[in-house]
Image (cartoon, rainbow, N blue to C red):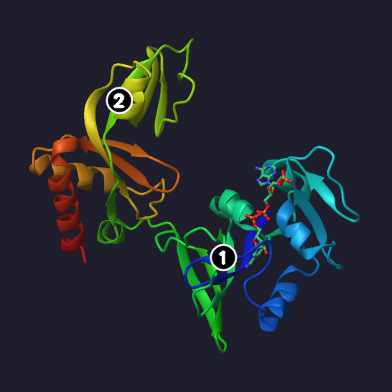
């Protein structure tokens, strides 16, 4: 399955106003038709209501939490996962909005087909940020007052020099701690850890210090969370070693966790600025 998000987005991120579009842009409607024709579309119930009918030549899956909702020529899904399952594994799925559905699907998209409207718009619905660390502009076509853009996911980097040159470290705000909770009780309700690791001795959770304290969890290693925004391949060799060597030189303890997309470092909170400076310096040496 390939997943494409199709949207028209104002300069300030607005995509909708009062249940409709903030503009009338025939070129965008033509592009929308060309992109979606013959494919399966997934849309939120509110976007469906704004269109008012199933569009011909395309299968329409509408996502709603309302168990009784139906509409002619429409397949109903009660969760985003169900919508993708209903689309089937071999489909080119077009996610066509609106804001709620884009937000919940952008992380699984392969492409973004965006009409950038060259103006700020007044409205109440937004497109999620198009993170340049994730999305690469593959093609653009300029129009009058708008431009069409196709974004693809940036290639994952495995070359050690390129990885270091593109580290792009970001310090998240706040303070985090490591806790261990018994395997049989699990994570206390209401907590949303950044990291969990299952060990024989218990479940390690890394989470905001305030959350741990509120839940009565004894946390240790008060840390800052730094994400390396480079899209590192899981098979890349040497990134962790280079980063921890640079931090070791400055006497900074560093706990590294590999996520699917990025590497994440937890360093002592009072050394966050020093760690960031060391990472930026490491990155510049490789440029
Ligand atoms: N510029 C563009 O390209 C573009 C494209 C599409 C839409 N739009 C605009 O965006 C606006 C609509 O966007 P929106 O964010 O308000 O609404 P939306 O995303 O179209 O639909 C939201 C609805 O989808 C259902 N839903 C969302 N998440 C769900 C989940 N996880 N499980 C089950 N159901 C779920 C809920 O329906 P129920 O309330 O029925 O439970 C929710 O109210 C309109 O102004 C529209 O014109 C713009």
Q: Secondary structure at mark 2?
A: strand
Picture coordinates of residue 6, whole percent (x, y): 64, 66
Vertical relation: 140 (above or below) 43: below
Q: Residue furthest left?
A: 250
Picture coordinates of residue 190, whole percent (x, y): 47, 25
Q: Residue furthest bottom?
A: 144
Q: Residue furthest right?
A: 72
Q: Secondary structure at mark 1?
A: loop
Q: Is mark 2 within 8 Å of ligand 1?
A: no
Query: Which residue matches tag 2?
Result: 178
Disc 1 packing (10 Å; few <14; some 14–19; many ≥20) = some
Q: Quadrant of the C terminus?
A: bottom left
Q: Residue at x 70, y 73 (%)?
A: 32
Q: Residue at x 81, y 67 (%)?
A: 38
Picture coordinates of residue 46, whole percent (x, y): 72, 55
Residue 154 in view, yes or no: no
Q: Is mark 1 within 8 Å of ligand 1?
A: yes
The answer to whether residue 141 is left or right of residue 285 is right
Q: How many numbered marks are there?
A: 2
Cα distance in 3D space between marks 1 and 2 = 41 Å
Q: Residue at x 56, y 65 (%)?
A: 123
Between disc 1 and disc 2, the foreground one is: 1
Query: Which residue matches tag 1?
Result: 123
The answer to whether residue 45 is left or right of residue 179 is right
Q: Nearer the viewer, residue 45 or 96?
A: 45
Q: Hey, which quadrant is residue 253 in on the image?
A: top left
The answer to whether residue 88 is left or right of residue 11 is right
Quarter of the rendered structure image containing ligand 1: bottom right
Residue 166 in view, yes or no: yes
Picture coordinates of residue 115, whole percent (x, y): 58, 75
């Amino acid at each position: 399955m390939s997943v494409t998000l199709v949207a028209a987005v104002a300069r300030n991120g607005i995509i909708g106003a009062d249940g409709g579009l903030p503009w009338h842009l025939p070129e965008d409607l033509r592009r929308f038709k060309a992109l979606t024709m013959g494919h399966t579309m997934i849309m939120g119930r509110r976007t469906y209501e704004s269109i008012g009918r199933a569009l011909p030549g395309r299968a329409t899956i509408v996502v709603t939490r309302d168990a009784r909702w139906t509409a002619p020529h429409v397949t109903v899904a009660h969760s985003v996962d169900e919508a993708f399952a209903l689309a089937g594994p071999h489909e080119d799925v077009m996610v066509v909005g609106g804001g709620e559905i884009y937000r919940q699907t952008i992380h699984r998209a392969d492409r973004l087909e965006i009409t950038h409207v060259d103006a700020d718009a007044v409205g109440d619905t937004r497109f999620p940020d198009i993170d340049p660390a994730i999305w690469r502009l593959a093609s653009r076509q300029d129009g009058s007052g708008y431009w069409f853009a196709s974004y693809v996911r940036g290639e994952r980097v495995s070359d050690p020099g390129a990885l270091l040159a593109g580290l792009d470290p970001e310090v998240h705000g706040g303070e985090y701690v490591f806790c261990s909770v018994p395997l049989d009780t699990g994570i206390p309700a209401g907590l949303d850890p950044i990291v969990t690791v299952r060990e024989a001795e218990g479940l390690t959770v890394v989470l905001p210090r305030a959350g741990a304290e509120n839940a009565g969890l004894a946390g240790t290693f008060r840390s800052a969370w730094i994400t390396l925004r480079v899209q590192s391949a899981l098979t890349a060799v040497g990134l962790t070693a280079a980063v921890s060597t640079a931090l070791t030189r400055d006497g900074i303890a560093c706990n590294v966790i590999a996520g699917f997309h990025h590497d994440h470092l937890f360093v002592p909170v009072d050394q966050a600025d020093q760690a960031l400076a060391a990472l930026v310096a490491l990155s510049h040496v490789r440029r």
